[in-house]
Amino acid sequence: MYGFINTCLKSLVIEKFGEETWDKLRREARVQDTFMTFEIYGDDITMRLVAEACKLLDVEPAVVLRQFGEYFFEFCKRSGYDHMLRTLGGNLYEFIENLDALHSYLSLSYKEMNAPSFRVENNGDGTMLLHYYSIRRGLCHIVPGIIGAVAKDFFKIQIKMEIVNQTEEAEWTGKKEHIVFLVTQEPTFSNKARSNSKRSLTKPCMSSTGHNPTNKQTGEECVEGNWLRTRCSMRRNHWETVRGLVHLGKGKLLRGFVPVYPEALCIDLKTFCNAFPFHIVFDQELRVKQAGVNIQKIVPGLQTMQIRLDQYFRILHPEVPFAIPSIRMFINSHFVLQTCRDTMPQDWRDRPMLELRGQMVWMDSLQCMLYQASPLLRSLHELEERHMHISDIAPHDVTRDLILLNQQRLAEMELSNQLERKKEELRHLSQHLEQEKQKTEALLYAMLPKHVANQLKEGKRVEAGEFKECTILFSDVVTFTNICSECEPIQIVFMLNSMYMKFDRLTTVHNVYKVETIGDAYMVVGGVPIPVSSHAERVANFALGMIIAAREVTNPITGQPIQIRVGVHSGPVLAGVVGEKMPRYCLFGDTVNTASRMESHGLPNKIHLSPSVSQALNDKGFRLQVRGEIEVKGKGKMHTYFLEGNLRATDEQIMGWSSRELDSVPMDHGPTVPMKYGDSLMETTPPCLQPEAQPQAKNLAGKPRDSESYGSLHIDNPSEKNPSEENPLEENPSEENLSEGNPCCPEGGTSSPAKAREPAAVAIGNKPTRTRLCVLL
């Protein structure tokens, strides 16, 4: 079938049931999304779509096909065939009788079209038999939908169609479907006619005594008579009135017109054969009695009279046996005959065979059949292939004009087909572009908050915003410097990538924002950029998940799980974008500095909490251990705590696992289950978008700047140790270089964790190399 049919089916599903239903239907049927109008597709595609539609909608195939037939008629009208369909006939009988002629015309453009055929028989009781022939089985229920829609729209009548025969196939050669429908017109009334009919059904049918007649047959006859009178009155229209007034000739009315025939045919045989150069007359034995001059020139064997016609021609349409009874059964159909290659002259053997299309007329007085035909040619190219010329066709034959017009039509169709293909290519490119855009946006949103990224894409300036409540976490790997000095760089990359992928997954579970990573340092924040009241709980659970996840990361030196150190602090911060090249979403304020101190003064595999975090987690189901009072560089003595666990959540909930054992599947595999909290992300404008946030108006840390407000990771003396570190080989942050206040911008425009530690010494050959990264505190 041509793509026009499948496009109609797609349009029906989308219009009636929506785009999602069509997507589901085509996936189940395993077919493409779009179809080219002038491209041929296998019949199995349409059959699969119909079958899957029946399953999806849970209806019988007959219902789906009938609805498709009704919609197909409307789809054809919208596609520009409305006027063509309306002019086929003045009533339903004539419309159906000329459907084959319409298909024949369309076949000039749709060369591979194999349309069904229709034959109609008018019964004496007002009904008619519609014979439907098709090479495709199972689609006969489309016919009642199409014909019913035509009758209702064009002729304002309601019809009923029922199958009366499905086994009659004797007329067709090969395996064809032949269905016979009984078409019955149902009574239809307008409002006025319906009211009149109601009165006529009650008053005239009363007996003389004023009661309804008891004879059922009498009542039925009365109803039928009234209905017929109403029907006849409804049929009277303007044109019938005009025909009743117009007189022709000697006073005869148009409705009573009788043709007048001459006593003798006033045309000689030679003139007739020249005027109709492609006609053939043959008798019941198929013996040729007469032929036009041009058909004799192309098929010289016809010059031998009494030769059998079936030796030189075969019937292409309708596919019936070449016999007078079969031809007379389809006498109202157009017939297409094709020359037989074996009986053609030698110079025709290599050419395409000639096809004739015309009408069969039975001459009862002569017991002969007249075949009045014309060459079936679709374009000038086909005319040249057969070595024929326009002059070979009679001047009165519209085939001349049809060839020229169809030549232009084919050119327009080719252009339309090319435009349709370009449109489809553009649609695929648009879809591909949208997918790439989504990938780019996903990557951008992974680097910056969504509202910040959108502002930067629009070329707007991102204002800094103040957050009064948030919780910041820092972590690093214990003995990371020693690991770097004894391992290959690629091993370090694999180790950090494995660890960070697990940590990144946890940010999704607890909905915290990853600020950045530098070396082995990992920084996240809760309550920024979207404020939430449970920011401390989220970061605390995230920290517990980090300890669990670190057990699955192997130290490349010892082969044992790595150890990490975590520090957490809560307080106010100022957040904004720093730099234009490689912009980063940075956090500023003393809270960042204090969180870094908690991490640098922590212990391996411990989560070190400040007093503010301990207070925020109070009565929230977390198990805390008092560490006591310790000396913190730049902060003096602080009473700190260790986070031991969550009494109200399991490890599976903290890790975002579905129900499975902790060590059965690596945590970075399987679905991620977000942990539920008592609050939700606030649907408010982030503080960074509020105009009153002006970081230039006050000190970011809330106190005067001093000479220690800027720090760096460029440490030249690696001998300084953190007294709280248990491993004497671990090189810890230099307390002298830790800033106490505001950060500065690092190289490349990136912000850093608020910690100052020695950069990793990576062994490349025998020469240690240090990374040079600047941090903001």
Image (cartoon, helix red, strand yellow):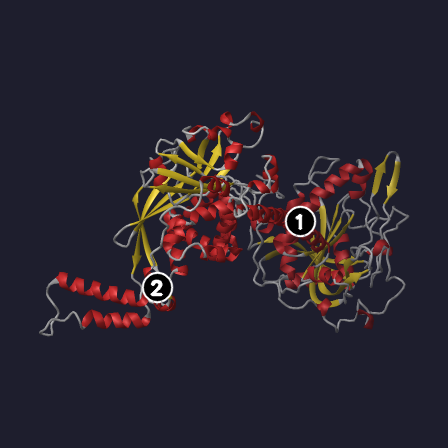
Q: Residue at x 62, y 55 (%)?
A: 510
Of 686 and 113, nearer the camera is 113
Of 250 and 467, nearer the camera is 250
Q: Is residue 665 left or right of residue 317?
A: right
Residue at the disc numbered 1:
429
The reply to whether residue 37 is in sight is: no
Q: Is residue 661 left or right of residue 589?
A: left
Q: Residue at x 81, y 50 (%)?
A: 722
The reply to whether residue 461 is in sight is: yes
Q: Looking at the rendered structure, which numbered label has been put on residue 625?
A: none
From the image, state whether disc 2 or disc 1 is nearer to you.
2
In percent of width and height, residue 151 lies at: 38, 57
The earlier-in-sequence mark between 2 and 1 is 2
Inspect the image, locate mark 2, and give the three-letter code of the amino acid beneath it: Lys
In percent of width and height, residue 232 lies at: 28, 65
Q: Residues within 10 Å of mark 1 (few under 14, many from 20)?
A: few
Q: Quadrant of residue 663?
A: top right
Inspect the image, locate mark 1, and give the three-letter code of the amino acid beneath it: Leu
In the image as oriented, which residue stretches furthest toward the left?
209
In percent of width and height, residue 723 lies at: 80, 50
In percent of width and height, residue 325 lies at: 33, 36
Q: Is residue 192 above or below residue 526?
A: below
SS for callout 1: helix
Residue at the disc numbered 2:
250
Q: Quadrant of residue 745?
A: bottom right
